[in-house]
Amino acid sequence: MRKLDSFDGINEFVAVAEHQGFSAAAKILNCSTSHVSRQVAKLEERLACSLLARTTRLVSLTPDGQAYYEQCKDIVQALSQANEQLRFKQYQLNGTLRVTAAGTFAEQYVVPALIDFAKEHLELNIDINFNSRNVNFVEEGIDFAIRYGQLSDSSLIARPLAKRPMMAVSSAQYLHENGTPNCPDDLKQHSCIVANSDVWRFSNKNTTYNVKVDGRWRCNTASGVVNACIQGLGIAYMPKANFNEGVEKKMLVPILAPYWSAGANSSIVYQNKQFLPLRARVAIDYLLERFKDWHE
């Protein structure tokens, strides 16, 4: 008689299903590929059905495997969370929390928050790498990323950290020499400082305006855009927090205020909550709590 109530192999099966391969699952689970393969094979034997379709290049779910995965994934996640919560009560956080981030928001606000987090967990190391490229979380050992805007990879999980409303600004010098635009379409006649996109989105009274802009200065860092704007090279349009200091010091002048869009989110991005180490789970919860009432 087969014993069908065992959990053996289920964790390995879910990992293979979510990472589409035995090697990737083994890396996530920190075990050998052969161990994962054996555990899944034993599970299939106990269930008397094939869960995975294997080829030389691809591992995919069979119809039975897909149905079984849908039932198992939440169970595995709940069990993992219960184990993590128990360990959290018993042990200090340790190891290295690896984070990738991009942008002024991360540098000015997220980094200080993680410094405070590090001061609360003295056995924990934190490694933050600033870049805006797409990262492979598994291969590069990244726990989570701080990213702005819409995700291009739908397989990733994004937890909104802060809403980033937009603001358009220029220097008083530029406006004196070139005039002040009264509506988004006027920007086509101005020198605009381009950051990541040359299509700027505005909104007013439920109407959206997408304006393609151009200008003499392009830069993919917020500080480079702000400095060029202060020096009179044109009009800039980015999340409001980038300009707060310049506006307060009267080095920048807000314009087109009725048309500023609500913007996008800065988010915590990660691959799979089920396989996040405890240090990453706790850090994510800490940041979400820290920024829950944050406003630009």
Image: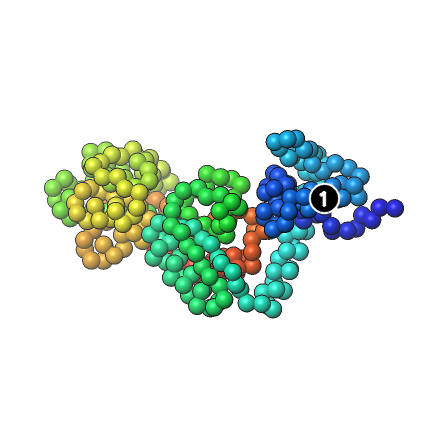
| Residue at 23% in and 58% down | 248
Image coords of residue 88 (percent x, y): 58, 65
Query: Is residue 156 visible from the viewing direction of this image?
Result: yes
Whether residue 143 sits left or right of residue 64 in the image: it is left
Image coords of residue 43 (percent x, y): 75, 44
Disc tally is 1
| Residue at 39% in and 57% down | 110
Residue 283, compared with residue 152, is above or below; it is below
Q: Which residue position holds label 1?
A: 38
Q: Which three-letter amino acid code belongs to the residue tagged 1?
A: Arg
Residue 55, compared with residue 72, is above or below; it is above
Image coords of residue 183 (percent x, y): 25, 39
When asked about the image quadrant of residue 215, the answer is: top left
Query: Is residue 186 visible from the viewing direction of this image?
Result: no
Whether residue 18 sits left or right of residue 136 in the image: it is right
Q: Nearer the viewer, residue 151 or 169?
A: 151
Query: Residue placed farthest to the right in the image?
Result: 1
Image coords of residue 167 (percent x, y): 29, 47
Whether residue 30 sits left or right of residue 166 in the image: it is right
Query: Residue placed farthest to the left in the image?
Result: 177
Q: Secondary structure at mark 1?
A: helix
Can you say which quadrant of the picture contains the C terminus?
bottom left
| Residue at 20% in and 58% down | 249
| Residue at 26% in and 39% down | 218
Mark 1 burial class by Cα count in 10 Å: few <14, some 14-19, many 20+: few
How is the protein colored in the picture?
rainbow
